[in-house]
Amino acid sequence: MGLSAGPVPVRVGGDVKAGLLELVEHATDAGWSRRRAVLLLGVDLDRIARWLARREVGRLDDDTPGGGPVHGLLDWERAAVGELHGTWGEVDRSHRKLAHRGSRLGLVHVSESSVRRVLADQGLILPGRAHREPTEKTAWPDWLEWKPNRIWAYDFTHFTRARRAVIAILDMVSRKWLTTLVSPEETSTQVEVAFTAALDAEGLLDLVDERTTTALRAALLSGERDALDAVIDDGALPLLLAVSDNGPQMRSHTTREFLAGVHIAQHFGRPHTPTDQAWIETLFGHVKGEWPHLETISDPGDLDDAELDRVRTEYNTVRLHASIGYVTPDDEHDGRGEAIRHNRVRGLAAARQARIDYRRNATENQP
């Protein structure tokens, strides 16, 4: 029965009580008195009398300690919660909304947590959100070459204290931060100015004039990939690919018209999927994280192009970038990155061999 030697504990389970009562009845049937039997078992005579009375009504198990709260839900309120689930569960899909729905309808007034507990007690489950079909990621175009000045990413970020928006353009291959523009607005105008500055800085504007084709511009302006593929099959390639999210500035007809005029194709990430343009998102994270003073500037005049250009110069020429093998974006953009990485590999091998040769040739004790 789970009992050790000694008096019966203050609280025991219904099975223990039933076993003790059977022992007492067995002893009295053998001629013992009830008092003698309960004394031998270490249980009070009054407890045995209570247990006998409770056994008659099938209530040997004790009730839950503490009783019930005076403000606990009534039976009709529990039933009303179940009714709410059946009627409005598919619509509201939330225990919080169901609680407010009950008050709105005048059906039952209970807290959100009470609705959740009642549903759990009744084994009722609210349906989850409807499954959304995943959006397929747009593949990179076949004509794209993975080298500097062939694929750029751009986006806006905000410096809220200065009340300014900043557009930045990044070369996705070399990670070079090409240009920045500070403005109180974020429209297609800022996109045009930033791209014009970046194309001029990279010496690409002259290429636009040299390769002007009406068919390519028309295909880019249409935004239809099939039309662009047909022009590309005829030998006309876009100057580069511009990657962005689906912001209104990027999707606007004015932006598309401008980019088509300079032979730049557009590539948009999936909605609500910032990782599709992670390169430019990472740039903003690094800039704000490693130059935190920029976010403390409250005077718009202090957050000007000159200050961001100073940070951009340090980012491009001093900061080593992990994703391109710990060289600077300028090194990678100008073609020096591979040689620098190769020199490090050769330097590591030479240093290792030098340490081995030193220890092999040294005559004194080595540690």
Image (cartoon, grey):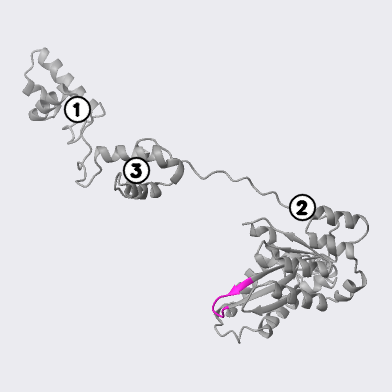
Q: In this view, does 97 lie to the left or right of 277?
A: left
Left or right side of 330 for 114 = left
Q: Label 3 to label 1, Cα distance in Å?
A: 28 Å
In the rendered image, the residue lying farthest to the top is 30
Residue 48's image quarter?
A: top left
Q: Name the residue under label 1.
A: 60
Which quarter of the rendering shows the N terminus? top left
- Give the percent coordinates (x, y) of residue 300: 59, 84
> Where is residue 102 shown, x and y percent of the image?
34, 46
187 relative to 45, above or below: below
Residue 55 shows in this picture: yes
Question: Label 3 amino acid?
Answer: Arg
Measuring 82% from the left and 78% from the top, which residue is drawn there? 200
Q: Identify residue for label 3.
A: 117
292 magenta-colored: no
Name the foreground residue: 172 vs 99.
Answer: 99
SS type, badge 1: loop
Image: 208 above or below 303? above
Task: Examine the structure image and report whether residue 159 is included in the region drawn in magenta.
Answer: yes
Q: In which quarter of the image is residue 331?
A: bottom right
> What residue sits 22% from the left and 28% below the top?
14
Which stretch did the figure color magenta? 157-163
Give the vertical position of 242 relative to 163 (above or below): above
Q: Looking at the rendered structure, which numbered label has been put on residue 139? A: 2
User: Which numbered disc, 3 or 2, marks the residue that appears first in the sequence?
Assistant: 3
